[in-house]
Image: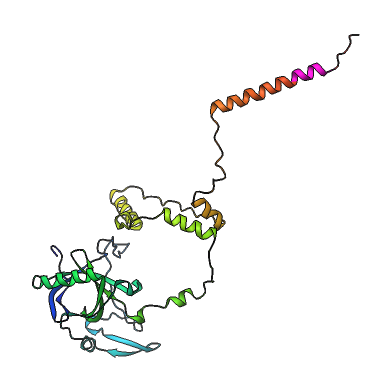
């Protein structure tokens, strides 16, 4: 991948066929605005130091080691060399263990995505794997040592190449049953379900990540720019919280089946004038009738 350094290079092997490949970072947060910790009094950057929790003395780097807490405040000391010795040996090979339907893996297991590209040699074998997977609509499960740990990787066709997503281990994923165990059992049917389906059908679209704005990042940019230019700081917009209402009424309004309370038919000027003339004519007629029926007084 031109202009981007590979994070890992090795081989991908399926059956007795292998091809040289390279992994490139597919997503990164490096372009986000970051801040340093500054001393207010001097304006200088603050450096991080390590202090002994008991003696409160500075601990130099050469005196720092690893430890695992077995009880409150009691640790087993583990040397960094001992940690390094536990790193599995790498043969730099993505060994495909199985091909599975793409929908078999719940995306809650997805960790980090990487673009997988051919590394010059073995491009034909790489293309054969990519096209074969695309035609049969399968993904590949592979294992290898990546970044000092044994990783399970899901490999799928993606554009001209492949995308390799590292997967979380089962013990890292929390059960959804515990998250949803207190939810009441509710079955929606009838008009309410029909209205929900209607609203969904009118809101169908395509996923386009370019249309989603990182509003927090944009606000930070505006803040930094204002500080650099010495301008007044932007005022945060007031957030209006929607009021709770009747669900069925809200669904009907969303589906365009109800008019807002203030939506009264508008009267044109001509109609308004005609109404005034009609009321005036009725008033004059009633006065005339009253004068004819009223008794006449005789003059003294």
- Is 107 rendered above or below residue 236? below
Q: Residue furthest left?
A: 121
Please state if 233 lies on the left or on the right of 292 as rendered: left
User: Which residue is located at x 55 percent, y 37 percent?
Assistant: 265
Specify the color scheme: rainbow
- What secondary structure characterizes most of the magenta part? helix
Q: Position of residue 232 (x, y in %)?
A: 36, 48
The answer to whether residue 265 is left or right of residue 160 is: right
In the rendered structure, the answer to whether residue 300 lies left or right of residue 194 reads right
Residue at x 35%, y 73% (from the top left corner): 106
Residue lying at 13% horizontally and 79% vertically, measured from the top left: 17
Return the residue found at the far right: 300
Determine whether, in the image, residue 231 is placed left or right of residue 20: right
Quadrant of the snapshot with the C terminus: top right
Instruction: Indicate the position of residue 266 as horizontal and vertical percent values.
Output: 54, 35
Magenta region, residue range: 287-294
Q: Work out whether residue 114 can be spotted.
A: no
Residue in view at x 35 percent, y 79 percent: 172
* 125 and 148: which is toward the camera: 125
């Amino acid at each position: 991948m031109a202009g981007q350094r590979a994070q890992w290079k090795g081989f991908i092997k399926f059956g007795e066929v292998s091809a040289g490949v390279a992994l490139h970072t597919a997503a990164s947060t490096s372009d986000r605005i970051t801040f340093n910790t500054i001393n207010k009094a001097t304006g200088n950057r603050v450096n991080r130091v390590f202090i002994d929790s008991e003696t409160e003395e500075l601990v130099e780097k050469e005196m720092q080691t690893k430890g695992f807490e077995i009880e409150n405040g009691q640790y087993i000391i583990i040397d960094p060399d001992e940690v390094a010795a536990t790193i599995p040996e790498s043969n730099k090979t993505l060994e495909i263990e199985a091909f599975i339907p793409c929908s078999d893996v719940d995306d809650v297991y997805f960790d980090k995505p990487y673009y997988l590209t051919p590394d010059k040699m073995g491009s034909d074998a790489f293309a054969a794997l990519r096209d074969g997977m695309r035609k049969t609509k399968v993904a590949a499960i592979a294992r290898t040592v990546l970044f000092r740990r044994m990783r399970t990787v899901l490999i799928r066709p993606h554009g001209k190449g492949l995308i390799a997503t590292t997967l979380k281990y089962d013990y890292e994923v929390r059960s959804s049953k515990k998250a949803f165990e207190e939810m009441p059992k509710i079955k929606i049917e009838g008009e309410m379900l029909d209205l929900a389906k209607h609203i969904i059908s009118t809101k169908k679209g395509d996923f386009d990540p370019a249309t989603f704005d990182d509003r927090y990042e944009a606000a930070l940019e505006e803040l930094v720019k204002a500080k650099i230019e010495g301008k007044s700081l932007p005022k945060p917009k007031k957030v209006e919280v929607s009021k709770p209402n009747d669900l069925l009424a809200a669904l009907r309004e969303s589906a365009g089946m109800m008019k807002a309370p203030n939506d009264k038919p508008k009267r044109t000027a001509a109609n308004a004038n005609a109404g005034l003339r009609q009321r005036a004519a009725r008033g004059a007629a009633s006065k005339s009738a009253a004068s004819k029926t009223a008794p006449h007084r005789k003059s003294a």
